[in-house]
């Protein structure tokens, strides 16, 4: 038996060869790594080890760490597409519906890795920060509110986005109790009124002359 045959049969390296499931295994490992460590601290070598592949195979599929990150945080929803449905109905309950929907999406295990990767990485990585910015503006609440004819969509979306990002950080990143363990209905009841005011309330913004 040759050394090559022995390696092929015995799997001496323990590395997964390229196959139909390899790309998804790498993406799963990347979401876990970026979600736990953020973009800067997560390494391609660590992703490869978690996926059971050689680091060169990660580069073969994705080309670079940044391209891997973009693929890993390809979010399962497009806010601009789903928010109009969430906002439809009684305007008085819109804030609670937005919060309940947001928490439901985050609580789904299949989604959380991508969202955590984006939130953690946006703190230290400019491309990730731009992705989050776009998710809240051109691809998210700002675009949806503009499409629906809300007044001052940019300001309202920025306020809603700030509330939801803060909620995500407190509930899912630092797991601040008792918020982290509260169910979706409780969170919607507590935070919904604030989002409701941002969506439908008066938002007096003082002019420079009126500011103290």
Image (tube, rainbow, N blue to C red):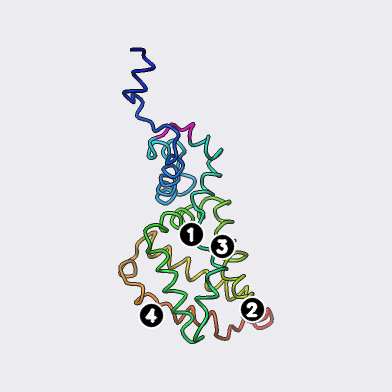
**Cα gap from disc 1 to disc 3, whole angstroms:** 12 Å
Report which residue position mark 3 lands on.
135
Between label 1 and label 2, give the one nearer the viewer: 1
In the rendered structure, are the residues bearing label 4 and label 3 in contact, judged by CB atoms less than 8 Å apart?
no
**Which numbered disc, 1 or 3, marks the residue that appears first in the sequence?**
1
Q: Residue at x 34, y 65 (%)?
A: 176
The x, y position of residue 165, in whole percent, is: 48, 65
Label 1 Cα neighbours within 10 Å, binned few <14 / some 14-19 / many ≥20: few
User: Residue at label 4?
Assistant: 189
- In which quarter of the view is residue 156 placed? bottom right
- Give the labeled residue for mark 2: 152
Numbered badge on residue 76: 1
Distance, label 4 to label 3, CA atoms, is 25 Å
**What is the magenta range?**
53-57
**Residue closest to the eye, 71 or 191:** 71
**In contact (CB < 8 Å): disc 1 and disc 3:** no
Q: Residue at x 34, y 70 (%)?
A: 179
Dot 2 crowding, Cα within 10 Å, few <14, some 14–19, many 20+: few
Could you say where residue 185 lies in the image, as x and y percent from the top left? 35, 76
Q: Specify the quadrant that holds the C terminus.
A: bottom right
**How far apart are the alpha carbons under marks 3 and 2?**
18 Å
- Between circles 1 and 3, the one closer to the viewer is 1
Helix, strand or loop at mark 3: helix
Indicate which label's residue lies in the foreground, 3 or 2. 3
Residue that lies at the very extreme toward the right in this rendered image: 209
First along the sequence among labels 1 and 4: 1
Q: Report if residue 56 lies within the magenta region.
A: yes
Residue 210, label in figure = none
* Alpha carbons under labels 1 and 2: distance apart: 28 Å
């Amino acid at each position: 038996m040759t050394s090559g045959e022995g390696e092929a049969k015995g799997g001496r390296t323990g590395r997964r060869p390229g196959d139909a499931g390899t790309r998804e295994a790498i993406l799963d490992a990347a979401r876990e790594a970026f979600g736990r460590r953020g973009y800067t601290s997560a390494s391609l070598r660590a992703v490869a080890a978690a996926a059971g592949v050689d680091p060169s195979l990660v580069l073969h599929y994705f080309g670079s760490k940044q391209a891997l990150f973009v693929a890993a945080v390809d979010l399962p929803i497009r806010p601009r597409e789903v928010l109009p449905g969430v906002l439809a109905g009684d305007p008085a309950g819109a804030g609670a519906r937005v919060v309940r929907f947001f928490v439901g999406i985050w609580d789904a295990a299949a989604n959380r890795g991508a969202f955590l990767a984006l939130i953690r990485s946006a703190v230290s990585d400019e491309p990730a920060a731009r992705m989050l910015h776009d998710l809240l503006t051109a691809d998210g609440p700002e675009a949806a509110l503009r499409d629906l004819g809300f007044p001052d969509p940019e300001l309202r979306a920025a306020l809603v986005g700030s509330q939801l990002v803060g909620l995500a950080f407190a509930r899912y990143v630092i797991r601040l109790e008792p918020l982290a363990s509260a169910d979706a209905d409780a969170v919607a009841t507590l935070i919904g009124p604030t989002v409701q005011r941002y969506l439908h309330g008066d938002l007096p913004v003082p002019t420079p002359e009126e500011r103290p």
